[in-house]
Protein backbone atom coordinates (compact mmCIF):
# COMPACT_ATOMS: atom_id res chain seq x y z
CA UNK A 1 0.00 0.00 0.00
CA UNK A 2 1.50 3.33 -1.03
CA UNK A 3 2.15 5.90 1.68
CA UNK A 4 0.02 9.00 1.52
CA UNK A 5 2.10 12.00 0.58
CA UNK A 6 2.32 14.69 3.24
CA UNK A 7 1.32 17.95 1.59
CA UNK A 8 1.67 20.12 4.70
CA UNK A 9 3.11 23.54 3.85
CA UNK A 10 5.98 24.33 6.28
CA UNK A 11 5.29 28.06 6.11
CA UNK A 12 1.61 27.59 6.87
CA UNK A 13 2.52 25.38 9.81
CA UNK A 14 4.94 28.01 11.11
CA UNK A 15 2.37 30.78 10.74
CA UNK A 16 -0.22 28.75 12.61
CA UNK A 17 2.24 27.95 15.40
CA UNK A 18 2.93 31.66 15.95
CA UNK A 19 -0.76 32.68 15.69
CA UNK A 20 -0.02 34.55 12.46
CA UNK A 21 -2.04 32.42 10.04
CA UNK A 22 -4.78 34.46 8.34
CA UNK A 23 -8.02 32.45 8.66
CA UNK A 24 -9.47 34.13 5.55
CA UNK A 25 -6.73 34.70 2.97
CA UNK A 26 -9.33 34.48 0.20
CA UNK A 27 -10.77 37.81 1.39
CA UNK A 28 -7.58 39.70 0.51
CA UNK A 29 -8.14 41.44 -2.83
CA UNK A 30 -5.41 44.06 -2.72
CA UNK A 31 -3.73 44.35 -6.13
CA UNK A 32 -0.25 44.16 -4.63
CA UNK A 33 -0.99 40.78 -3.08
CA UNK A 34 -2.60 39.50 -6.27
CA UNK A 35 0.24 40.66 -8.52
CA UNK A 36 3.34 39.65 -6.54
CA UNK A 37 4.49 36.42 -4.92
CA UNK A 38 6.39 38.51 -2.39
CA UNK A 39 3.10 39.08 -0.57
CA UNK A 40 1.36 36.18 1.13
CA UNK A 41 -2.30 36.58 2.10
CA UNK A 42 -1.87 33.75 4.61
CA UNK A 43 0.52 35.92 6.65
CA UNK A 44 -1.74 37.84 9.01
CA UNK A 45 0.94 40.27 10.17
CA UNK A 46 1.96 41.12 6.61
CA UNK A 47 -1.67 41.64 5.61
CA UNK A 48 -2.38 43.98 8.52
CA UNK A 49 0.86 45.89 8.05
CA UNK A 50 0.23 46.46 4.36
CA UNK A 51 -3.34 47.53 5.08
CA UNK A 52 -2.11 50.21 7.48
CA UNK A 53 0.70 51.22 5.11
CA UNK A 54 -1.77 51.70 2.26
CA UNK A 55 -3.52 54.35 4.33
CA UNK A 56 -0.55 55.95 6.11
CA UNK A 57 1.95 55.95 3.25
CA UNK A 58 -0.11 55.69 0.07
CA UNK A 59 -3.02 57.86 1.21
CA UNK A 60 -5.74 55.29 0.55
CA UNK A 61 -9.12 55.77 2.24
CA UNK A 62 -9.63 53.68 5.38
CA UNK A 63 -12.82 52.05 4.11
CA UNK A 64 -11.22 51.19 0.77
CA UNK A 65 -8.03 49.77 2.29
CA UNK A 66 -9.88 47.76 4.95
CA UNK A 67 -12.14 46.17 2.34
CA UNK A 68 -9.20 45.32 0.05
CA UNK A 69 -7.51 43.41 2.86
CA UNK A 70 -10.63 41.68 4.16
CA UNK A 71 -11.18 43.82 7.23
CA UNK A 72 -13.68 46.32 8.63
CA UNK A 73 -13.00 49.94 9.57
CA UNK A 74 -12.82 49.17 13.32
CA UNK A 75 -10.34 46.37 12.59
CA UNK A 76 -8.20 48.80 10.61
CA UNK A 77 -8.09 51.26 13.51
CA UNK A 78 -7.21 48.48 15.93
CA UNK A 79 -4.33 47.37 13.69
CA UNK A 80 -3.11 50.96 13.22
CA UNK A 81 -3.15 51.60 16.98
CA UNK A 82 -1.39 48.30 17.73
CA UNK A 83 1.31 49.00 15.13
CA UNK A 84 1.84 52.50 16.49
CA UNK A 85 2.11 51.27 20.07
CA UNK A 86 4.07 48.01 19.70
CA UNK A 87 5.42 47.72 16.16
CA UNK A 88 4.97 44.50 14.22
CA UNK A 89 4.63 42.52 17.45
CA UNK A 90 1.42 44.40 18.14
CA UNK A 91 -0.14 42.89 15.00
CA UNK A 92 0.21 39.34 16.31
CA UNK A 93 -3.12 38.16 17.79
CA UNK A 94 -3.12 37.66 21.55
CA UNK A 95 -3.12 34.15 22.95
CA UNK A 96 -6.60 32.67 23.44
CA UNK A 97 -7.99 33.18 26.91
CA UNK A 98 -10.46 35.23 28.96
CA UNK A 99 -10.92 38.57 27.30
CA UNK A 100 -13.36 40.32 29.62
CA UNK A 101 -13.30 44.08 29.27
CA UNK A 102 -9.71 44.15 28.00
CA UNK A 103 -10.57 46.84 25.47
CA UNK A 104 -11.72 49.12 28.27
CA UNK A 105 -8.29 49.92 29.64
CA UNK A 106 -7.74 52.43 32.44
CA UNK A 107 -6.74 54.98 29.80
CA UNK A 108 -10.01 54.48 27.90
CA UNK A 109 -12.10 54.62 31.08
CA UNK A 110 -10.38 57.77 32.35
CA UNK A 111 -11.03 59.40 28.98
CA UNK A 112 -14.66 58.29 29.10
CA UNK A 113 -15.09 59.82 32.55
CA UNK A 114 -13.70 63.10 31.21
CA UNK A 115 -16.21 63.03 28.36
CA UNK A 116 -19.09 62.47 30.77
CA UNK A 117 -17.89 65.27 33.06
CA UNK A 118 -17.56 67.69 30.14
CA UNK A 119 -21.03 66.93 28.76
CA UNK A 120 -23.72 66.38 31.44
CA UNK A 121 -26.21 65.35 28.74
CA UNK A 122 -23.97 62.48 27.60
CA UNK A 123 -24.98 59.03 28.83
CA UNK A 124 -22.57 56.07 29.28
CA UNK A 125 -24.57 54.09 26.71
CA UNK A 126 -23.65 56.74 24.12
CA UNK A 127 -19.90 56.36 24.67
CA UNK A 128 -19.06 53.38 22.39
CA UNK A 129 -19.16 55.47 19.20
CA UNK A 130 -16.86 58.08 20.72
CA UNK A 131 -14.52 55.41 22.09
CA UNK A 132 -14.32 53.77 18.67
CA UNK A 133 -13.54 57.11 17.02
CA UNK A 134 -10.86 58.01 19.57
CA UNK A 135 -9.23 54.61 20.20
CA UNK A 136 -10.29 52.42 17.28
CA UNK A 137 -11.95 49.80 19.49
CA UNK A 138 -15.60 48.81 19.55
CA UNK A 139 -17.25 48.01 22.87
CA UNK A 140 -20.80 47.11 23.83
CA UNK A 141 -22.77 49.88 25.59
CA UNK A 142 -23.50 47.64 28.59
CA UNK A 143 -19.82 46.72 28.88
CA UNK A 144 -18.92 50.42 29.00
CA UNK A 145 -21.56 51.11 31.65
CA UNK A 146 -20.46 48.20 33.85
CA UNK A 147 -16.76 49.05 33.53
CA UNK A 148 -17.38 52.67 34.49
CA UNK A 149 -19.52 51.61 37.46
CA UNK A 150 -16.75 49.26 38.67
CA UNK A 151 -14.15 52.00 38.26
CA UNK A 152 -16.23 54.47 40.28
CA UNK A 153 -16.77 51.87 43.00
CA UNK A 154 -13.02 51.20 43.23
CA UNK A 155 -12.24 54.91 43.45
CA UNK A 156 -14.95 55.42 46.06
CA UNK A 157 -13.52 52.63 48.24
CA UNK A 158 -10.02 54.05 47.78
CA UNK A 159 -11.15 57.53 48.91
CA UNK A 160 -12.99 56.03 51.88
CA UNK A 161 -9.89 54.09 52.91
CA UNK A 162 -7.75 57.24 52.68
CA UNK A 163 -10.23 59.23 54.77
CA UNK A 164 -10.28 56.45 57.39
CA UNK A 165 -6.48 56.43 57.58
CA UNK A 166 -6.34 60.20 58.02
CA UNK A 167 -8.97 60.03 60.76
CA UNK A 168 -7.13 57.23 62.54
CA UNK A 169 -3.86 59.13 62.31
CA UNK A 170 -5.47 62.20 63.89
CA UNK A 171 -6.93 60.11 66.73
CA UNK A 172 -3.67 58.28 67.41
CA UNK A 173 -1.71 61.52 67.32
CA UNK A 174 -4.07 63.03 69.87
CA UNK A 175 -3.63 59.95 72.07
CA UNK A 176 0.18 60.18 71.88
CA UNK A 177 0.21 63.94 72.36
CA UNK A 178 -2.99 65.18 74.08
CA UNK A 179 -1.99 68.80 73.59
CA UNK A 180 -2.08 68.39 69.81
CA UNK A 181 0.53 69.20 67.17
CA UNK A 182 -0.25 72.87 66.70
CA UNK A 183 2.56 74.18 68.88
CA UNK A 184 5.23 71.78 67.59
CA UNK A 185 7.74 72.49 64.81
CA UNK A 186 6.61 70.90 61.52
CA UNK A 187 9.48 68.38 61.57
CA UNK A 188 8.43 67.10 65.01
CA UNK A 189 4.78 67.04 63.99
CA UNK A 190 5.60 64.91 60.92
CA UNK A 191 7.70 62.55 63.04
CA UNK A 192 4.96 62.07 65.59
CA UNK A 193 2.34 61.52 62.90
CA UNK A 194 4.51 58.76 61.43
CA UNK A 195 4.90 57.26 64.89
CA UNK A 196 1.14 57.35 65.31
CA UNK A 197 0.68 55.27 62.13
CA UNK A 198 3.39 52.85 63.26
CA UNK A 199 1.67 52.47 66.62
CA UNK A 200 -1.60 51.46 65.04
CA UNK A 201 -1.25 47.92 66.38
CA UNK A 202 -0.11 48.98 69.92
Image (spheres, rainbow, N blue to C red):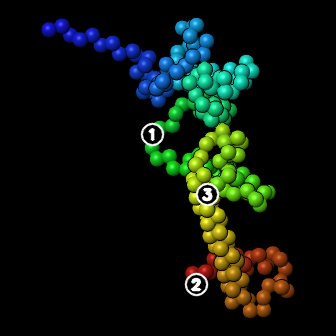
**Where residue 112 sits: x, y (%)?**
70, 53
Give residue 196's quadrant in the image: bottom right
**Where residue 47 sits: x, y (%)?**
57, 22
Give residue 56's quadrant in the image: top right
Nearer to me, 8 or 184: 8
Give residue 51's quadrant in the image: top right
Comparing labels 2 and 1, the label whose residue is closer to the camera:
1
SS of the residue at dot 2? loop
The residue singled out by tag 3 in the image is 145
As measured in the structure, the alpha-carbon distance from the residue carrying label 3 to the one carrying label 1 is 25 Å
SS of the residue at dot 1? loop
Horizontal side of residue 113 vs 3, given as left or right: right
Horizontal side of residue 13 vs 74, given as left or right: left
Eyeballing the image, is 111 above or below 10?
Answer: below
Q: Earlier in the sequence, mark 2 or mark 1?
A: 1
Nearer to me, 48 or 122: 122
Q: Are marks 3 and 1 in contact (CB under 8 Å)?
A: no
Nearer to me, 169 or 196: 169
The residue singled out by tag 2 in the image is 202
| Residue pictured at 42% horizontal, 27% vertical | 17
Q: Quadrant of the C terminus?
A: bottom right
As measured in the structure, the alpha-carbon distance from the residue carrying label 2 to the one carrying label 1 is 50 Å
The residue singled out by tag 1 in the image is 96
**Where residue 142 sits: x, y (%)?**
57, 54
Q: Are marks 2 and 3 in contact (CB under 8 Å)?
A: no
As measured in the structure, the alpha-carbon distance from the residue carrying label 2 to the one carrying label 3 is 44 Å
Horizontal side of residue 12 vs 138, given as left or right: left
SS of the residue at dot 3? helix
| Residue pictured at 84% horizontal, 80% vertical | 185
Q: Earlier in the sequence, mark 2 or mark 3?
A: 3
Residue 49 in view of the camera: no
Residue 101 in view of the camera: yes
Amino acid sequence: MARREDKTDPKETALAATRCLNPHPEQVHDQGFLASEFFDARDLVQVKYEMVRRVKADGAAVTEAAAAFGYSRPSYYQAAAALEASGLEGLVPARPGPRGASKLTEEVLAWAEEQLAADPALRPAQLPDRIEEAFGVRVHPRSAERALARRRERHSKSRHASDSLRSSAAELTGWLLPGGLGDLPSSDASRLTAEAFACGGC
